Amino acid sequence: MSPFSGPFPPSLLASSTQLSRRERQIMDLVYRHGHLTASEIHEHLPEAPVAAAVRTMLRILEEKGHLRHEKDGPRHVYYPVTPRSVAQRTAVRHLVGTFFQGSRAAAVAALLEESDRPLSADEREQIASAVRRLRDEGK
């Protein structure tokens, strides 16, 4: 079974792994802020290329179906097409499938062991609650 089977549109799954480093950086910014103009994206990018290159990447991300824009006077304001929750699930499925041979337990263990700080009591309770909920749901 493919690690990408599920409720995600095939176009999203196919294109999600075809983002360049810069495209991923742009998508990270737009998801983090909710929406940004081209100039705001240019300001936030590390070692940003020229503004025209950023606008070209934004157009490409629109063509790939990741971004959409609305006009606000002379500016274009960019928004993610895919809800953050869907993008998160897609990215996690890809990560688990690629680096943990599909094992969610191995991925969770790696996350818990990797941290440079201990889990807080609240984080431990959130994890325990999620495990209880999944057990109750038979998952």
Image (cartoon, rainbow, N blue to C red):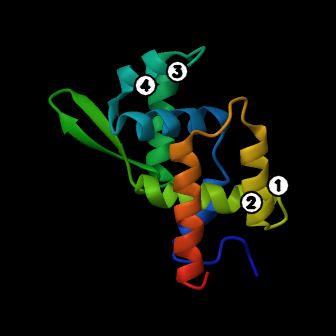
The amino acid marked with disc number 4 is Ile
Q: Quadrant of the C terminus?
A: bottom right
Q: Which residue is mark 3?
A: 45
Q: Which residue is mark 1?
A: 99
Q: Which residue corresponds to the image point at 83% horizontal and 59% vertical from the top-left?
A: 100
Numbered circle sitting on residue 96: 2
Say if mark 1 contacts mark 2, CB within 8 Å.
Answer: yes
What's the distance in space between the residues labelled 2 and 4, CA to CA? 29 Å
Q: Which percent across, then down, holds residue 65?
A: 46, 55
Q: Which residue corresponds to the image point at 59% horizontal and 50% vertical from the top-left?
A: 124
Say if mark 3 contacts mark 4, CB within 8 Å.
Answer: yes
Q: Which residue corresponds to the image point at 76% horizontal and 82% vertical from the top-left?
A: 1
Say if mark 3 contacts mark 1, CB within 8 Å.
Answer: no
- Front residue (pair 68, 24): 24
Q: Using residue 39 as the reference point, say whether residue 118 is left or right of it.
A: right
Q: Secondary structure at mark 1?
A: helix
Q: Which residue is mark 4?
A: 41
